[in-house]
């Protein structure tokens, strides 16, 4: 099996790294990056060849920054993976829950634990750049009245205790991650396609655009709108379609869409996550 290298945003044992190893296997070599922009930049330079970024969560919704970066960068989607997100309250050994005054974590994780904050209104919330990075901050700074919200693996790596397990609001907490690359790497039979397009500023443009898929019985799995920069109150649309650009039906739909839309970019055809 190929030992792939892949970059991700955050520290080791962040959920992005866990998702990367779920997709590529435990032998994958994972390289941390400070930001999503750096992940895209590294992949553009093929250092390494692959990157992984979260694109949506079942509780907090879409990660709009990564939708924008997909449009702005010359990279494609070559795969996807869904990961169950288990959020744990982690503290140094010997620290009790009653002693915790501050909790560190990424804003997305913080937002997925609203019931915990309601039950502990006196705890100060401290947003950080990463879930696993929050555990690292506490370990390196030697904080004794602080905790972090992160993965079980991060607690084990920094030799900390899990005070409370799975404090997310709902157990149906999944994040969808995209595998990106500048190369057309084959991870299986493609059965899902992602595109982005802008409609012309005319009445019925969006209806006509979506009709090209309906007329060919192509199932639309997701639609996401984002502002069209530089043109107030105009939008671009991201679509996930059930099908592959290797299929004639999808090719015909895109040719039809080109007649209606002002701009189209195919982000990739890839195997859908199980």
Image (cartoon, rainbow, N blue to C red):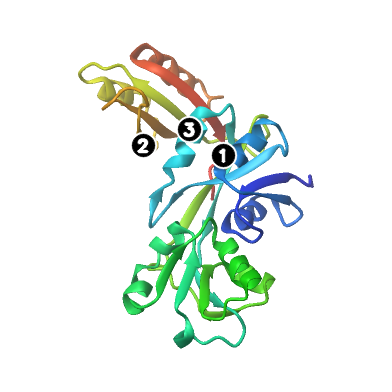
Q: Position of residue 256 (x, y in %)?
A: 39, 15
19 is higher (above) or lower (below) than 79: below
Residue that badge 1 annotates? 37
Q: Position of residue 65 (x, y in %)?
A: 45, 41
Front one among 151 and 203: 151
Going from the N terminus, do you reach mark 3 or mark 2 first? Answer: 3
Q: Secondary structure at mark 3?
A: strand
Going from the N terminus, do you reach mark 3 or mark 1 first? Answer: 1
Q: Position of residue 60 (x, y in %)?
A: 38, 55
Front one among 107 and 141: 141
Residue that badge 3 annotates? 194
Asked whether the viewer can see residue 243, the reply is no
Front one among 139 and 111: 139
191 is higher (above) or lower (below) than 125: above
Spatial CA distance of label 3 from label 2 is 10 Å
Spatial CA distance of label 2 from label 1 is 23 Å
Front one among 72 and 166: 72
261 is higher (above) or lower (below) than 23: above
């Amino acid at each position: 099996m190929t030992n792939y290298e892949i970059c991700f945003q955050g520290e080791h044992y962040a959920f992005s790294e866990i998702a990367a190893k779920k997709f590529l296997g435990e032998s994958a070599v994972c390289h941390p990056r400070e930001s999503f922009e750096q992940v895209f930049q590294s992949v553009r330079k093929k250092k390494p060849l692959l990157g992984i970024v979260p694109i949506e969560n079942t509780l907090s919704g879409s990660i709009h920054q990564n939708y924008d970066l997909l449009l702005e960068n010359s990279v494609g989607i070559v795969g996807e993976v869904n990961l169950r997100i288990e959020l744990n309250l982690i503290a140094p050994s010997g620290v009790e829950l009653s002693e915790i005054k501050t909790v560190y974590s990424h804003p997305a994780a913080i937002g997925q634990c609203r019931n915990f904050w309601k039950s502990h209104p006196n705890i100060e919330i401290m947003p950080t750049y990463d879930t696993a990075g929050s555990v690292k901050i506490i370990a390196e700074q030697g904080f004794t009245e602080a905790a972090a919200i992160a993965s079980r693996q991060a607690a084990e790596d920094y030799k900390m205790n899990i005070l409370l397990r799975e404090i997310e609001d709902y157990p149906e907490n999944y994040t969808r991650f995209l595998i990106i690359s500048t190369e057309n790497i084959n991870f299986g039979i493609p059965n899902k396609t992602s595109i982005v397009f802008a409609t012309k500023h005319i009445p019925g443009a969006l209806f006509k655009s979506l009709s090209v898929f309906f007329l060919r019985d192509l199932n639309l799995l997701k639609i996401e709108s984002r502002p069209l920069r530089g043109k107030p109150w105009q939008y671009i649309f991201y679509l996930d379609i059930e099908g592959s650009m290797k299929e004639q039906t999808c090719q015909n739909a895109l040719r039809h869409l080109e007649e209606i839309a002002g701009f189209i970019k195919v982000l990739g055809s890839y195997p859908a996550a199980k």
